[in-house]
Amino acid sequence: MELLSAVASFAVVAGLLTLIPGLDTALVLRSAATHGRANAFATAVGISTGALIWGAAAAGGATALLTASETAYTALRLAGAAYLLWMGVGMLRSLRRAPSALNPGGSRALGAVRPVPVLVSYRRGLTTNLLNPKIGVFYMAMLPQFIPAGTSHLLMGVLLALVHDVEGLAWFTLLILGVEQLGALLRRLRVKRQTAQKSLDAVTGSVLIGFGVELALSAEH
């Protein structure tokens, strides 16, 4: 398989995977609607950084540990599940927050709340991705099929992960801009920010808890 052919083939597979709604999509949408464009892009970049690290680790053989060691896989899986459950429960608990805790005058985002540093959003995206062992297993299973003979596994793995990141960031950009348009529409319709914020936290929190439970109960590599 030649280099360009390998990259093009992987781009198709990664592109289809990117379009499937999942945990990453939920995090970016929530960040965009709650904290604004900058935080949403920071979350997306954090997710992309995690994917790049997983890609490099898979190409270098480090993720073979996840497939070879049941203990390592289980430990990472439970850590990831606990993190998702912690975030999800935190969002649901925020529904009981007093109305004054919200920022009624904010206009940066739909249902804007107190500002969150972009570094926090970046770290949240990165941590969520790195604590999901299924990402590592995916790269471990897929990347070798698209690495041509005679090429550096590490460099090729990083290149393919970058292709995946570019597709992911392009998709996230569309989602973020779409959320901004939705926020403008809801403001024109005079939907209360507090109501929209609570609805968003309820949905996202439930999604995170669902992913956390699914990850905790999943025993498959």
Image (spheres, helix red, strand yellow):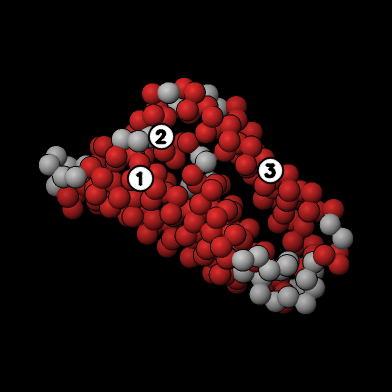
- The three-letter amino acid code for the residue at tag 2 is Val
- Which quadrant: the N terminus? top left
Answer yes or no: do the residues labelled 3 and 1 have beta carbons within 8 Å? no
Left or right of residue 64, residue 1 in this image: left
Q: Position of residue 213 (x, y in %)?
A: 64, 33
Residue at the (72%, 54%) spot, across then down: 201
Split into 4 quadrants, where in the image is the C terminus? top left
Nearest the camera: 123 or 151?
123
Residue 164: percent from the left, percent from the top? 36, 52
Q: Which mark is residue 86?
A: 3
Residue under pointer 2:
137
- Residue at left 77%, top 68%? 193
**Residue 1 appears in view:** no
Residue underneath mark 1: 55
Q: Residues within 10 Å of mark 1 (few under 14, many from 20)?
A: many
Q: Earlier in the sequence, mark 1 or mark 2?
A: 1
Distance, label 2 to label 3, CA atoms, is: 24 Å
Q: Amino acid at mark 3?
A: Trp
**Mark 1–mark 2 distance (CA, rounded to whole Å):** 10 Å
Q: Residue at x 54, y 48 (%)?
A: 127
